[in-house]
Amino acid sequence: MNAKETIEAGKAILGIELGSTRIKAVLIDENNHPIAQGNHSWENQLADGLWTYSTEAIWQGLQDCYANLRKEVSQQYGIEIEKLAAIGISAMMHGYLPFGADGKMLVPFRTWRNTNTGEAARQLSQLFVYNIPLRWSISHLYQAILNGEEHVKDITFITTLAGYIHWKLTGRKVLGIGDASGMIPVDPETKQYRQDMVNKFDKLVAPKQLGWKLADILPEILLAGTEAGSLTKEGAKLLDLSGHLQSGIPLCPPEGDAGTGMAATNAVKQRTGNVSAGTSSFSMIVLEKELSKPHEAIDIVTTPDGSLVGMVHCNNCTSEINAWAEIFKEYQEMLGVPVDMGAIYEKLFSKALDGDADCGGLMAYNYVSGEPVTGFAEGRPLFMRSATDKFNLANFMRSQLYAAIGVLKIGNDILLKEEHVKVDRITGHGGYFKTPGVGQRMLAAALGSPISVMKTAGEGGAWGIAILASFLVNKQDSQSLADFLDTKVFAGDVGTEISPTAEDVEGFNKYIENYKRALPVEEAAVKFKR
């Protein structure tokens, strides 16, 4: 079938991902190739000291994104979307969405970006003897309990953003195992929440007499390939305001953006990994066994089919680069030169390749917000140099590109050098890799490992969750997710690989040692109040 026939026959598959700055919808055909897409841009808001997206922004954004997809389908193919083979919903991982008995959100959505949960994460990490990150749902829940927040006693259900959207579309309170593993740890054997930790938590909060047990308010865990409900009539109307979309469409388990990134880069097998680098960044390396001990910088989550993953999550990545690109745009406009933002990024990224391997001594921090891996609850973007450093555009841009993945390197050094985790292939995707060969080379230097980038890298997590929806309806009998990706999606494509040079590795190591030694400067900047 061609794309038009696929859509008309109801065999197209829809993936939607709610990212930090963009909601994206991707429609794919039976061969998992994108045939249409829609977008909606949005930004988080700082309300009462917490990063959030309002309920109105969530639904208006989702509906506008789908409307834009319909518009593209109409313009390209002259038809309407009425029936689909499957749907998948994904969103930024973690965070906190508590609901009461009436199904309404009790407090505004608290996103992964919030770093106010330090005391809760510290206590739970000690209690569980397991690293519990600040952004995990259990940290937000326990911090609300420690704060004595009134809403806690009224909770009947907590979930993630993906789980919330899925629930409203299907009526099912479920979550894919990858996203669920960012709520509270899961057992790699049973593929369910760690019962020992659930019991410890219930005992910890028992004196509060909250009226609920943890297992009663958590979503049900489902593995990739398991049907997770179908689109209800109410859900169809909620997603498609035009009323054309029919109900009854099956949905795959909702997943977080980490899980969809693994699917989109064919990195669900053990000894494979991927790096997603955009507004935030994270690396995911699929482990062969558990780590020797907990590490504060390493989150243990899972693939969409339940394998353990060592995750390094960084709150900041390209936002500071974007801010500098806007400065160069403003300068270009001042000169009366026509502005092409794509060309600005390409020129600046490419110029970084001319810089010294150690950035000529220049130093940058991209901390727009806090950075838990390095111990910062708040951040201040900084650029530093001494009078004797080699200050030029190439070194300046290289220092910004290094800064974007500096924290990522610090975390991965623990996995690769301390824990001696073996990895055969690491694949990069996201905006950091958009200019061919630049971000890829920088990351290879940072990790001391070859980095692959696929042609599909730009498709992102919306394509990844569409693939997981495709796996639901197109897999053969007991076919594994890894086999489905190998044979039906990527068909042997491993992308374009760049290996690190000795000079680049030495230069990045020199940069990162200076970076760690200069962290007190960043700390002083955070303490400075204007």
Image: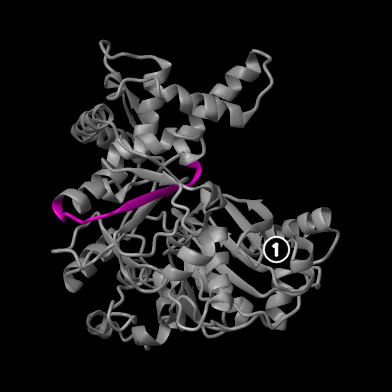
Asked if the magenta segment contains residue 426, the reply would be: yes
Residue at 47% from the left image edge and 40% from the top image edge: 433
Q: Is residue 309 visible?
A: yes
The image quarter in which residue 233 lies: bottom right
**509 on left or right of 366:** left
Residue 222: image x %, image y %?
44, 80
The image quarter in which residue 188 lies: bottom left
**388 on left or right of 490:** left
Residue 310: image x %, image y %?
28, 60
Q: Give the range drawn in magenta.
A: 418-431
In the rendered image, the vertical position of residue 39 relative to residue 464, given as above or below = above
Residue at 51% from the left image edge and 39% from the top image edge: 434
Residue 110: image x %, image y %?
46, 62
Looking at the figure, which quarter contains the N terminus? bottom right
Residue 63: image x %, image y %?
70, 63
Looking at the figure, which quarter contains the C terminus? top left
Residue at 34% from the left image edge and 52% from the top image edge: 425
Kind of residue at disc 1:
Gln
Mark 1 lies on a secondary structure that is: helix
Name the residue beneath numbered marker 1: 63
In the rendered image, the vertical position of residue 419 relative to residue 100, given as above or below = above
Q: How crowded is mark 1: few (under 14 residues within 10 Å), some or many (20 or more)?
A: many
**342 on left or right of 136:** right
Colouring rule applied to residues: one colour
Q: Can residue 108 be seen in this view?
A: no
**Furthest residue in direction top, as rendered:** 388
In the rendered image, the vertical position of residue 431 relative to residue 98, given as above or below = above
Who is closer to the viewer here, 92 or 1?
1
In the rendered image, the vertical position of residue 153 relative to residue 366, given as above or below = below
The image quarter in which residue 368 lies: top left
